[in-house]
Amino acid sequence: MAAIALALAAFVAVYLMGRHQGRTAAHEEAQGPVAAEGRAATATLAPAARADTGAALPPPGAALKRAYAGLQARSDAGDLAAATRLYRDLSQCRRYARMEREVRRYSDELLAARDDAGNAQQRQNLRAGLEAAETNERSLEALRAQCEGVDAAMLGALTPNLQKAALLGEPYARACYLARGPGVDAAGLLDHPERLSAYRGNARALIERGIADGDWRVLDQLRGAYEPGADSLLAAAVGKDPAQRYRYLKLFRLGAPPQPGVTDEDLAMAAAKLNPTQLADAEAWASRTFNQNFHGRAIDADGPLWDPCVFPSP
């Protein structure tokens, strides 16, 4: 019974993280048809042209099937708000079937465990689990209404809209695209292998823009990409550069809280691979970038470094 409750609690935490982020990160940011997908996937290094219309978006949770064509047309025209809304809604709808299956399974396991709740602690765990399951059911109903009728062709537009929002400068899209790239829709790569070359072509410009914007999420992705043995898409795109690795580690360390994720041992090991000139240049770059681009802000000043692909809800 305890294992079931813990499993459900873990699932609830992941499932509802986006809503939690929406509350904690609200202060951080203001809020083409599939045939056009190929054109979007071959975007150049230059940031996408923005053409924000200022038109109101559909209300949160609105049926995506009805809103899709209008949002896609606006996204194709360079509307940041529409591209952001599309990649977020499509991402949620892609996960809907899996979430429905998991919610049902955990609910069934909890109900089946009722007869085993023999003592007070087990009964308390059961009550807590059932309350969480009820919350999940309500969220699932809202998501079902939002995603009803969304077909495979619409879902296939997730990657190009994520890329579009990233190139237009939406922070979560930028960090998510760097973290996962076209792998956010791995099955789509079979039909659109050109997305890999587009990712390679766009990655460095997005990195530069993220550092210029003082984006800790981008820096967090770089920290992992330069780790020895890293095998992510981003690691492949940036290659192995000991001087760059030290720059990013040092910059992250400058903004890290008292017990940082980057240890002094990591820095020492990275520094050992540099000559004195490289080390001095990297130290100066990190200090200058921390003060000018990140404005001396500690990492936790922007809230925790959530998974950027689990974005804030509206």
Image: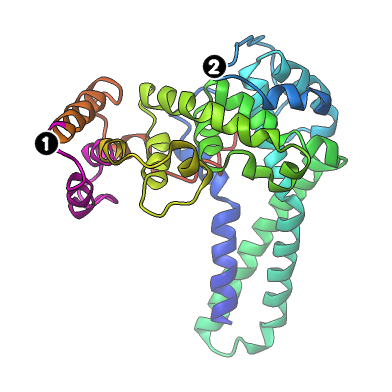
Q: Which of the two marks, 2 or 1, is nearer to us in this view?
A: 1
The one nearer the camera, 171 or 263, is 263
**Quick one: quadrant of the C terminus?**
top right
In this rendering, does residue 60 appear at all? no
Q: CA distance from mark 2 to mark 1?
A: 36 Å
Residue 32, above or below 266: above
Residue 152: numbered disc: none
Choose top left, top right, bottom left or bottom right for residue 207.
top left
In the rendered structure, which amino acid carries the disc numbered 2?
A: Pro
Q: Are marks 2 and 1 in contact (CB under 8 Å)?
A: no
In the rendered structure, which amino acid carries the disc numbered 1?
A: Pro
Please state the horizontal and vertical placement of residue 185, each as a whole percent of the image. Answer: 69, 44
| Part of the protein shown in magenta | 249-277
Residue 140, above or below 174: below
Please state the horizontal and vertical placement of residue 46, each as a whole percent of the image. Answer: 54, 15
Please state the horizontal and vertical placement of residue 212, each as a whole percent of the image. Answer: 37, 21
Q: Residue at x 25, y 40 (%)?
A: 246
Within the magenta stretch, is there residue 252? yes
Please state the horizontal and vertical placement of residue 59, each as a whole percent of the image. Answer: 71, 27
The one nearer the camera, 160 or 53, is 160
Q: Find numbered disc 2 in the image and state the secondary structure of the residue it sits on.
A: loop
Residue 143, above or below 294: below
**Quick one: quadrant of the N terminus?**
bottom right
* Mark positioned earlier in the residue sequence (2 or 1): 2
- Write down the residue under mark 1: 276
Q: Residue furthest left?
A: 276
Within the magenta stretch, is there residue 255? yes
The one nearer the camera, 130 or 299, is 299
Quick check: 172 left or right of 66? left
In this rendering, does residue 262 appear at all? yes
Residue 47: numbered disc: 2
